[in-house]
Image (tube, rainbow, N blue to C red):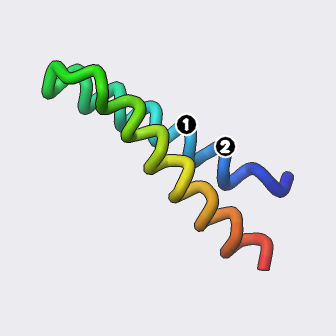
Amino acid sequence: MENQGLAWGIAWGLLAGAALAVVFDNWLLPGVGMMLGILIGMMVDRRGSS
């Protein structure tokens, strides 16, 4: 699967964002976490494919 890294990044980003949202009571953080997760997933995906 070429998009496995991206999927993992999104999943971890959502989990981290949701956890931060609960801890800090700020529901903007899941979106930030998802964006970070997508970026991390893209980096992991690119590194793994090359």
- Residue at the image point whose x is 41% and y is 32% from the top: 31
Label 1 Cα crowd, 10 Å radius (few <14 / some 14-19 / many 20+): some
Residue 32: which quarter of the image?
top left
Instruction: Relative to 30, say whether 34 is above or below.
Output: below
The residue nearer to you, when weighing 31 against 14, is 31
* Picture quarter with the C terminus: bottom right
- Mark 1 and mark 2 in contact? Answer it, CB < 8 Å: yes
How many marks the image carries: the answer is: 2
Residue 43: which quarter of the image?
bottom right
Q: Amino acid at mark 1?
A: Ala
Q: Position of residue 30 (x, y in %)?
A: 38, 29
Q: Position of residue 8 (x, y in %)?
A: 61, 45
Give the residue number, with chain letter if any, for mark 1. 11
The residue sitting at the bottom extreme is 50
Give the CA separation, mark 1 to mark 2. Answer: 6 Å
Label 2 Cα crowd, 10 Å radius (few <14 / some 14-19 / many 20+): some
The residue sitting at the left extreme is 24
Instruction: Relative to 48, say whether 18 is above or below.
Output: above
Q: Position of residue 34 (x, y in %)?
A: 47, 38
Q: Amino acid at mark 2?
A: Ala
Image side of residue 33 versus residue 11, left or right: left
Give the residue number, with chain letter if any, for mark 2. 7
